[in-house]
Amino acid sequence: MTEVRTEVGMWIENRRVGARGGEKMPVENPATEETIASVPRAQAADVTVAVEAARRAHPGWRRLPGLDKAKLLHEVATRTRAMRHELAELMTLEGGKPMIENLDEIEWTAACFDYYAEIGRHSRGNAIPPSFEHQVNFTVKEPFGVVVAIVPFNYPLLLMAWKVAPALAAGNTVIIKPAEETPLATLELARAFEILPSGVAAIVAGTGEEAGEALVTHPHVDMVAFTGATATGKRIMRLAADSLKKVNLETSGIDPFIVCEDVDLDVAARGAVWARYLNAGQVCTSAKRFYVVDAIADAFVDRFVTLARAIVVGDPRRPETDMGPVISGEALARLKQSIDRATREGARLATGGNRPKGLDRGHFLEPTVLDRVRHGSSATREEVFGPVAAIVRVRDVDEAIVLANDSDYGLGANIYTNNLHYVMKAMEEIKAGTFWVNDPLTDNEAGPFGGMRQSGIGRELGEEGLDAFREPKHVHIDYLQERKSYWFPYADRAWE
Amino acid sequence: MNTLPLYIGGCFQNGADPSQDVINPATGASLARAARATTAETEAAIRAARQAFDSGVWSGATAMKRGQVLLEVAHRLRAQAAELARLETENMGKPVLEAEADVADAAACFEYYGGLATKVTGEVNPVPSDALSLTLKEPVGVCGQIIPWNYPLLMAAWKLAPALAAGCTTVLKPAEATPMTALELARILDGVPDLPKGVVNIVTGDGPTVGAKLAASDLVDKVAFTGSTRTGRSILRAAADSNLKRVTLELGGKSPNIFFADAHWEAAVEGAVFGVFVNQGEVCSAGSRILVEKSIHQRFLEAVVEKARTIRLGDPLDPATRMGPLVTAAHRERVLSYIEEGRREGARLVLGGGKPNGALARGAYLEPTIFDRVDPGMKIAQEEIFGPVVAVIPFEGEPEAVEIANATPYGLAGAVWTRDIYRAFRVVKKLRAGVVWVNHMQPTYVEAPWGGVKMSGAGRELGLHGIDNYLELKQVYVHLSEDPIGWY
């Protein structure tokens, strides 16, 4: 097996440290079920050290000129790129995502730091029209202070960068808590953060119940940015409510994918299969509900099933592997329950549902297709975070739009069609933070990302993603020294 | 005979030379006599605007106050909408239904910029923390605004509303042929109590005297012009030769209206007709070139001709009328000379081409005219005719459509009709134009920017960008330390 340093420290005050009480937690390779490393498991006392250091570092970091901040963030990007092979190897081992996807993720991570290095110094606020000529009014946008970034297992570095890059660019100091399943690449990336002043960026490993809750409830944390399940997002918001901490939440999605009768079936089916099985279906914006128009449903499902069966499942470190394992044994068990429930509710298991042949160890599941799923059944109501596609057949695009929109969630939505009117109607009617036409799941760091309904609060990326980490201060200057007519005594003012 | 005054420094005054005959083009009857302002009168208007600006009475008024004045203007326009529409139609010849829409659009323009006045924001710049850097926006100063005759009241609104919202003062020159509604607007402005005298001045007259003076005056800070490319060029030259005043130009066009075989048939046929024959084709963005895919060319042409035959020419005051006379008999002669040129070049005339007989013979009417099998290089496919004349050009395939569409010196607008989203956006991205419509042609909103690329203009009017034409930036640096620099 690949060598992993079995003891990896956290990163607090620009030093490698363990948990003060010596607590540790194991890290598993989901493709082999072997324990590959042990990392510190931070407790409340460790969290306090990181938070206080971040708080002390904040005034200096905030005042650092934008140009200097930009140079440092560009340097973080450069160092991230230089470490791409080590980082990709670690991510593949701890997360089970194919190596090629991890190499892509590292490039996107670096690009995100480059992007915010620049737009962070692009704007500071607005000069607004005063009520009277002898006044000057403007807003300056200020950082919140200490920001906590809680990151999920599926894209450990990218979703970290979406929070940390804009938060630092806006002048906050940050504490990163990687997912307990995937702390290794993030801890390794501390080497890119060495160049930042002490306390500006810290990495705290641990569980959600211990380190996560301690961070969210700490009185000196000003804001929490989170990506993960909706249930956890709600818990964070409840905890944050006690001290009115600001939150930015990017949570679950059950994204619809509409396929119309006029598509090139080969292109649409290939796009759909990638949109569902990328990263073993563990993407918040994975296409999860497919609404396929009757006229082409048989032909589409045939192709979809054929392509799903052709996906190469196996060791994520091998270059030909399309899909690795899911993240944990628990996740695999939940997926199997979801598949059983769907078939009990009347869906037809068109392919998959089992452990792939020849893979005796690791949390592997065959690419699975549930056809003739009834809209309203659990497969269309609950987020299935794994390689399981639910296909719902519909009369026409109008029915597809209605059903696609019938959800508690609103993260992303997809449509495949050539027809301009279908596109415009679906775009107008479906509640979703991102709407993809004929090109699923692509991001652009210049465009906002996030969810409507229970898929989140706020946006990451783009200028919106910078404003998520700062708040405006309105400054009012009056340069006329005069007694105002509206002050006391009111006897001077006639009642109107 | 009604003699129209000049409006200078908040006073209506008779011009020294009230010799401009104002004609109703539907009947040839004289409506009024307008002043041909002299150079001295133009200078007096400029001085009035200069004085009003320099006094700070308007630029120093709160944005809220300026906004309220514009909203009040809109309110008063709506209150006398029917009368204004009738006046516009009598003077310009457009169907009264269109004139009513123009008045509503003019009011909406004053409302939009009335609301925008209080939302003009500058920036706080991210300089190092020992300083505060502000970008403030300030009115550019005295404006000369020169407008055409095709939408007299609406063009006045497009010019005045953003300038006034920004805190500028202005001298507005209506087109020689169409001063009626502009002077009625002057009466409305004069009646708004919080609009100080001299902020808006309205001077009728000819281009070589009044327009040229506005373009050349050192007291004018900015000229905004809508009209022909030729005149636009001379204004730019005059600005360069005088005080480098800011110039925005909205000029001519030869806009392509492109039809692919998969377009919705009835909508496309009507869109082709409406795109070029609305307002008698006297529209800068007229879809005066119909580019049609060869596979549907013959059938589409027949349907367009049939639809164009149903256009009701007649008394523009009759609400059933869909096409009135051209603006003047002289303009009709110019358009007829292009029709003659089209015949001579060998294009196939399939509809119209002449003056209607009978009851319409007294007015400056011209039949809706369609040329088929027009070669993209012909004069009628290259030059702006500004009348009800359209050139139908067949094409084979998308690349050829785009190539023909872009092969004129103009770049104001364009439209593409298709139900295929891939094709729609491919063509949208390739068209060199300031405005592109998909599956429609001509809808225009005050909220969205308007203007052309290439020789169709410089700058954009309307929308959030429209007010920037009337603002200058001032960068303010505030040092946050009182220590000496310590350089010497």
Image (cartoon, coloured by chain):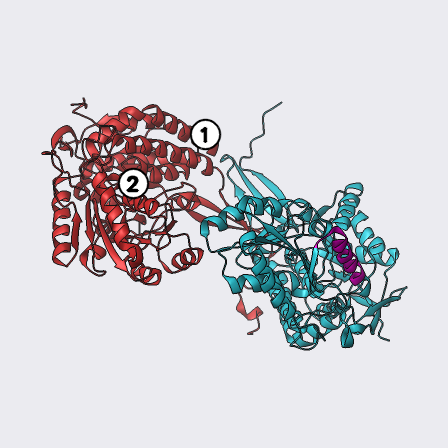
Q: From the image, state whether disc 1 or disc 2 is nearer to you.
A: 2
Q: In this view, does B13 lie to the left or right of A57?
A: right
**Image position, residue B447 (x, y; %):** 56, 58
The span shown in magenta is B331-347
Image quadrant in which the N terminus of chain B is located:
bottom right
Of the 4 image quadrants, the one containing the C terminus of chain B is top right
Q: In which quarter of the image is residue A293?
A: bottom left
Chain B hue?
cyan
The label on residue A68 is 1
In the foreground, B181 or A137: B181
Q: Report the chain holding disc 1.
A: A
Chain A's shade in the image?
Answer: red
| Circle 1: residue type | Asp
Q: Mark 2 points at which residue?
A: A149
Q: Magenta stretch containing residue B342, yes or no? A: yes
Magenta segment's dominant SS is helix
- The answer to whether residue B48 of the structure is visible from this angle is no
Question: Percent x, y for residue A258?
Answer: 32, 54
Q: What element carries label 1?
A: helix
| Quadrant in which residue A5 is drawn | top left
Residue located 65% across and 77% down the image:
B319
Query: Three-letter amino acid code at disc 2?
Result: Ala
Q: Can the viewer see residue A315?
A: yes
Q: In which quarter of the image is residue B352?
A: bottom right
Q: Which of B312 and A226 is in front in this view?
A: B312
Q: Is mark 2 on a helix, strand or loop?
A: strand
Distance CA(mark 1)–CA(mark 2): 23 Å
**Is residue A261 left or right of B100 when viewed as pictured?**
left
Callout 2 environment at 10 Å: few (<14), some (14 to 19), or many (20+)?
Answer: many
